[in-house]
Image: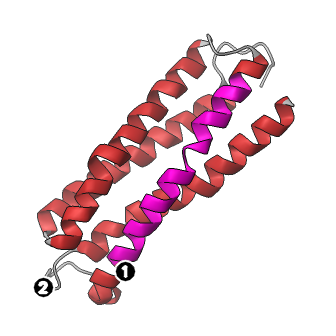
Amino acid sequence: MTKLLLSVHVLAAILAIGPIAVAASMFPRFARTPGDADQEPGARRGPATAALLHRVCRGYAVFGLAVPVFGLATGAQLGVLGDAWLITSITLTAIAAALLALTILPAQQRLLATPDGAAATRLGMLTGIFNLLWAIVVVLMIVRPGSTTGA
């Protein structure tokens, strides 16, 4: 049962968090106003692409709820819910989820309604923080400080 739970947890993380990370990272460049001097030539189709990227982020965020659900189930099955590396991972996951739900998605929605180059730049920074949090969680899941498994 542990292998099944872990497999679903890892698959959900790859298939949900990966697309959010990519779409959220791409969104600011397509959400800038058409007159932005630093805008890439392909970004001229910005509003439609930005709207699509926002829908990807929103949709996969719902699917992404499976990641902590199956992660907690796996941790419980392994008896490691009290380990510091897992508590840290859970905390960072909660922070990343809150950042996505309370800051990134609403900022994307605002930028779709009113493009603003400065706000898009700030959103890019927040998205970078979101991605960094997930990178740290992945490292913690692999390294597992204090683990006796030798991994």
Q: Picture coordinates of residue 13 (x, y %)?
A: 62, 47
Residue at 78% in and 36% down? 5
**Secondary structure state at the residue bearing disc 2:** loop
The residue indicated by pointer 1 is 49
> Mark 1 and mark 2: span between their CA atoms?
16 Å
Residue 151's tag is none
Principal secondary structure, stretch drawn in magenta: helix
Residue at 35% in and 46% down? 101
Neighbor class of circle 2 (other Cα within 10 Å; few <14, some 14-19, many 20+) is few
Q: In the image, 63: left or right of 1? A: left
Which quadrant of the structure image shows residue 4?
Answer: top right
* Camera sees residue 98: yes
Q: Relative to 60, does residue 54 appear above or below in the rendering?
A: below
Q: In the image, 16: left or right of 148? A: left
Please state which amino acid type lies under the numbered disc 2. Answer: Gly
The residue indicated by pointer 2 is 35
In front of the other: 100 or 128 = 100
The residue segment tinted magenta is: 50-75
Q: Picture coordinates of residue 125 (x, y %)?
A: 28, 52
Please state which amino acid type lies under the numbered disc 1. Answer: Thr
Q: Picture coordinates of residue 150 (x, y %)?
A: 80, 20
If you read the primary sequence from the N terminus, does the residue marked by circle 1 or circle 2 appear first?
2
Looking at the rendered image, the quarter that the N terminus falls into is top right
In front of the other: 92 or 125 = 92
